[in-house]
Image (cartoon, grey):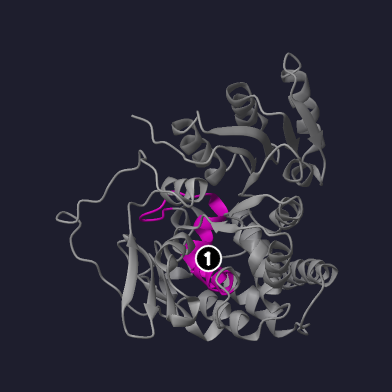
Amino acid sequence: MKGDLLLARSVVILGSTGSIGTQTLDVIKWHHDDIKVVGLAANKNIDILEKQIRIWRPHIVGVAHPGAARLLKSRIRDTNVEVVSGQNAASTVASCDFADFAVSAIVGMEGLMPTIRAIESGKTVALATKEALVAAGEIVMSKASRHGVNILPIDSEHSAIFQCLQGHDIKGVERLILTASGGPFLRFSKEKMKGVTLEDALRHPTWSMGVKVTIDSATLMNKGLELIEARWLFGIDPMKICAIIHPESIVHSMVEFVDGSILAQLGAQDMRLPIQYALSFPERTKGFCDKINLTKAGSLTFEEPDLERFPALRLGYEALKTGGTLPCVLNSANEKAVDLFIAGKIGFCDIAGLVEGVMESHNVTEGASLEQILVADSWAREQVSKQAGRIRG
């Protein structure tokens, strides 16, 4: 029996071929009578994109890679789907005027401008692209307020907090508590972590995610980014946000109130659950995700993160506290360092070291414009490349 969405929606999915994008389409398939997919945007994976086009028949598709776009056009010439290409392809899809809802799931800073364009066109945004808020949270949330747009979190941790806050005033919150599994290296010593490989880092113990996010989870940088994202999503004092280790990944996050009460959201390790909640908000609908049997779940454990073994999380706290352009530099330096690790050019432990070095050499700008954010983004990437060259040398 299918769930019933009370609000029919026309949706564009930015990053449709990635992990969140494909899982979003799983959810929509369950609710296909209520949600119309009118736009898709991807980088260059046209094999998956072509299959999505033939199933969903969107009005418009964006492909960032021009060569891949040309090939896709030749493959789907029997359809009436419009294909746009180039650096602004996702932004074009995001701003199309025949959708009222956008799922922002492009990994990294490449998702910032499409998210902004979706907001400027008046769409509700279901946000998985955490980097948009990490790098330019004040700008993004100000635009959302100005355009009367809701930002609904898809990250499991922020969805959990969002759910716990329903019916509560943020003024009554003592702390937002984000949970982290600890990744595959939770019990590794610093010495042992020096020898881990890409394959080791991709063996996440509880979640199935894209490559970049999985590596960020292994360094705990993902949690550092999420601290900053939470600050903007919920408009709360940075000092009231923290992260704790919860290896079982059943409690997705918690809210502690000023009276000492703590509300927690529990669920299966399935991203389709927060995706469905965002798509159906403010209603709850029947779904197809596995349910937790609490009598068989076993013990739920919590512990403080070790910031010495996981310096990336410490850097996240520093960027959260300092603000300005430093969170953008943290994020962009990390993106570049992770790319270098994936390419086998640096070691796992070099990721946080490179990010820290770039952060230390950055002159922070307060109240930065979008142009200044983009300059800081480029600068941070260049600095990582320079420092990595010295490591390799």
Q: Which residues are magenta?
A: 203-231
Q: Residue furthest left?
A: 295
Return the residue nearer the eye: 72 or 116: 116
Residue 229 on the magenta segment: yes
In percent of width and height, residue 344 lies at 61, 56
Secondary structure predominantly adopted by residues drawn in magenta: helix
Q: Is 341 drawn above or below residue 80 in the view shown?
A: below
Give left or right: position of 281 versus 346: left
Q: As shown in the figure, which amino acid type bears the numbered disc 1?
A: Asn
Q: Is 133 drawn above or below residue 82 in the view shown?
A: below
Q: Quadrant of residue 322?
A: bottom right
Give left or right: position of 187 versus 356: left
Is residue 345 in view from this perspective?
no
Q: Quadrant of residue 193?
A: bottom left
In percent of width and height, residue 207 lies at 40, 53
Count neighbours of disc 1 (C-alpha within 10 A) and say few if under 14, some if 14 to 19, many if 20 or more: many
Return the residue nearer the eye: 69 or 156: 156
Q: Which residue is mark 1?
A: 222
In percent of width and height, residue 92 lies at 79, 43
Q: Quadrant of the N terminus?
A: top left
Q: Residue at x 69, y 80 (%)?
A: 359
Is residue 108 in view from this perspective?
yes
Q: Is 304 drawn above or below residue 163 in the view shown?
A: below
Q: Quadrant of the C terminus?
A: bottom right
